[in-house]
Amino acid sequence: MSDSKTYTPKVLADEIGIDPKVLRGWLRKEFTRPDEVKNQSWIITEEVAEAARAKFEKNKAKAEA
């Protein structure tokens, strides 16, 4: 069974506890998209979401404290 869950930057940023602009900036640096999908809505895969959660884990810990 394939895990095909996807996220928007707003949904994922809310989950992580960061501003969506911060998440999109990080995504642009770490997961650069092909030119043909630039200026379109982000569709974040579970794999990329896991990387974002790991990167911003300390932010979520601060928010929950």
Image (cartoon, rainbow, N blue to C red):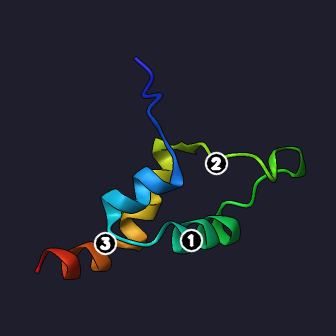
Specify few, some or many for label 2: CA neighbours under 10 Å numbering under 14, 14-19, or 20 or more. some
Instruction: Provide the secondary structure element on which disc 2 rests.
Output: loop
Residue 22 x %, y %: 53, 75
Between the C-alphas of marks 2 and 3, the distance is 21 Å
Mark toward the viewer: 1 or 3: 1
Q: Amino acid at mark 2?
A: Trp
Specify few, some or many for label 1: CA neighbours under 10 Å numbering under 14, 14-19, or 20 or more. few
What is the count of numbered marks?
A: 3
Q: Are the two marked residues, 1 and 3, in contact with CB atoms closer than 8 angstroms? A: no
Q: Which residue is mark 3?
A: 57
Disc with the residue nearer the chain's start (2 vs 3): 2
Residue 48 x %, y %: 52, 52
Residue sitting at x 66%, y 60%: 31
Between the C-alphas of marks 1 and 3, the distance is 17 Å
Instruction: Provide the secondary structure element on which disc 3 rests.
Output: helix
Q: Which residue is mark 2?
A: 42
In the picture, residue 24 is in which quadrant? bottom right
Residue 26 x %, y %: 59, 72
Examine the rendering and report whether any part of residue 5 can be seen: yes
Q: Is residue 47 left or right of residue 58?
A: right
Specify few, some or many for label 3: CA neighbours under 10 Å numbering under 14, 14-19, or 20 or more. few
Q: Is residue 37 left or right of residue 16?
A: right
Q: Are the two marked residues, 2 and 3, in contact with CB atoms closer than 8 angstroms? A: no
Mark toward the viewer: 2 or 3: 2
